Image: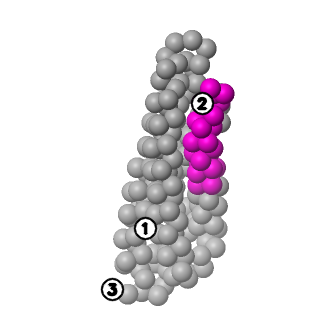
Amino acid sequence: MQSSDASACLPSGGRVFCTFPDVLFITDFIFGGLVWILVASTRLDTLYPYISDLQGWVMFVSVFCFAATTAFMVMYIIGTHGGRSSWVTLDAFYHCLAALFYLSAAVLLAVATRLYSVYRTGELFKAYQENIAAVVFAYLATLSYVIHAVGSLLRWKKCS
């Protein structure tokens, strides 16, 4: 079933918050924002400088995906896609890339948190707890982006 009319496949206006997989923009936005906030508030350790590198990648992924998800959501709401089928392809590509990025960020953040596990007591205990929360939300963001990517790929197959 081929259709060249993307407006039937891509929502605009308030329908963005009522259609699958686009309703997942909300969970992508919330979980990604929480990862960004939690990693940004974590104290960096000078004993393990490579933890900063791992957290730097997580910050890049969370800020990039937060900004891109916000841009996509706003563009869908105002109807920028204009009925072009190339937007269906772009949507599927972005969400697959974001899912891959978030998976790598979640794994690296778990590694960094494991390195912080020596600080279960003392002054860095708060940073350890923040990293645990960030890992949980990073995996939830990964799950949200994976589900969104699968939905976008199914829409791409249907509408391209």
The nearer-to-camera label among 1 and 3 is: 1
Residue 131 x/y as whole percent: 53, 31
Q: Secondary structure at mark 3?
A: loop
Neighbourhood count class around disc 3 (C-alpha, 10 Å): few under 14, some 14–19, many 20 upward: few
Mark 3 or mark 1, which is nearer the start of the sequence? 3
Q: How many marks are shown on the rendered structure?
A: 3
On the image, which quarter does residue 44 sit in? top right
As shown in the figure, which amino acid type bears the numbered disc 3? Met
Residue 71 x/y as whole percent: 64, 61
- Which quadrant holds the C terminus? bottom left
Residue at 52% x, 18% y: name it.
119
Pointer 1 with pointer 3, Cβ within 8 A: no
Q: Secondary structure at mark 1?
A: helix
CA gap, disc 3 to disc 2? 55 Å
Per the rendered image, the range of residues in magenta is 44-66
Q: Which residue is mark 3?
A: 1
CA gap, disc 1 to disc 2? 39 Å
The nearer-to-camera label among 3 and 2 is: 2
